[in-house]
Image (cartoon, grey):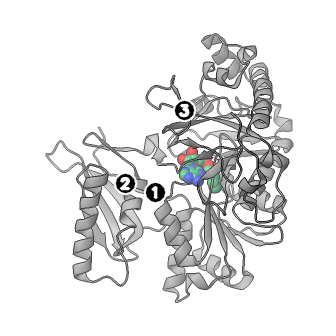
Amino acid sequence: MTTPTAESALATSGAVLDREETISRDELEALQLSRLQHTLAYAYDRVPLYKRKFDEAGVHPTDLRELSDLGKFPFTTKEDLRLEYPFGMFAVPQQEVARIHASSGTTGRATVVGYTKKDLADWAKLVARSLRASGVRPGMKVHNAYGYGLFTGGMGAHAGAEALGCTVIPISGGQTERQITLIQDFKPDAILATPTYLLTIADAMMKQGIDPASTSLKYAVLGAEPWTEEMRHELEVTMNIKACDIYGLSEVMGPGVAGEAVETQDGSHIWEDHFRPEIIDAFDPSVVLGDGEPGELVFTSLTKEALPIIRYRTKDLTRLLPGTARPAHRRMGRITGRSDDMIILRGVNLFPSQIEEIALRIPELSPHFQLELTRPEGQRMDQLTVKIERRESVTVEGVASAARVLKEQIKIHVGSSCAVNVVEPGSLERSNGKLRRIYDLRPKA
Ligand code: DLL
């Protein structure tokens, strides 16, 4: 497939791009093929789990002659990383691992990931590339409200902003009052946070009588959780900023696997010189789907040393779209949700992002909502209750009609009946990072 590399297609706002951002699709695919062949051999030789899995599947790294041959190789899952806890997936001796990150492990053992010095440099370069695409420029002050620590968000974003040549303010997540003071005093140009935490900051500013649109902030680079176009609009208007998406996951690298261009705001470009994406049918993983078709996103790393990852099943549901601002690098559509976050309500599949999309189109309702799943006494059917805060200015009649509209719209667009409970502003828990939307209160089987 040949994609034009016409300079006109590249939206840059005067920024100097990495060479790999401007190459043709053909050149990029040639690079992917040689890097993929290297990675498969490297993983097979150095990580016993990959050798075992490839041997069991009857494939050898030399079987990859063209990119589509990747489909012959076995998947890697979170469970594999858990079974190999802590360092069994590492492809280099521990002394060569410069940093370790890990997931929180709330649902079992933590998944541990490692980086060599070169991996850290590549990661910083890709976060820098993502931030630059989203409008951040060298010399800008960047307020980094992603959590620091074992979570990849804080330190990953930090290193990328530094590599780009920004002045980084490493505030981490939480301590919202302090965040507001520092935003007012240090006057940052950009903020890095989860979308729901930025909402918390904006909300807290309003409570203090500060207009969130009046700050120095011009750009926000938001990710680590699903968010919608409606949420983008809400944040851009409330804060008078340009908000772009950044995507990533620890097992594949961390933030910066994909980043969105501010000029087009049409989904994150996957940095395909470092990661080869595929979309598979989540229910029949043997089926690799074509571009444009919705399914589960799968990644293979092309340059990682400490933790090469082959066909990692992300559980994120999206689709691949052609590149725009960076023509050779495909974009990903918005993540509709994770397959393990899907609510199945009386046979209908539902994601929190669908509720966000619908609720934010109703002017009386705020973006603060929770989904409660219950099974009322003596009933066999599950019940979904959407608890959502009203906007400050709304009257009693306004609340009643908004609740009715939300219920109807969910029935029309999602196909399930639910209860809607409009609650007082400020009564629902606020986000400090990744927000929990679903509260499953059903009796455990
Ligand atoms: O959340 C990495 C990250 C940090 C990305 C900061 C962006 C900004 P994990 O904790 O491993 O890593 O969680 C990864 O978060 O599989 C998605 O389900 C979700 N996720 C990450 N970015 C986005 C996004 C970081 N932009 C998981 N949109 C992923 C939707 C996202 N979901």
Q: Amino acid at mark 3?
A: Gly
Per the image, label 3 sits on a secondary structure element best described as: loop
Residue at 47% in and 49% down: 336
The quadrant of the image that shows the N terminus is: top right
- Does the residue at mark 1 contact the one at mark 2 (Cβ under 8 Å)? yes
Disc number for residue 436: 1
Dot 3 or dot 1: first in sequence order is 3
Q: Position of residue 283 (x, y in %)?
A: 43, 29
Residue closest to the far top:
58
Residue at mark 2: 439
Depth check, front residue: 160 or 335: 335
In the rendered image, is residue 303 in sight? no
Image quarter of the C terminus: top left
Query: Which residue appears at 20% of the width and 44% of the height?
Result: 381
Coordinates of residue 108 in the picture (x, y in percent) = 52, 39
Residue 41 as seen in the image, left or right of residue 101: right
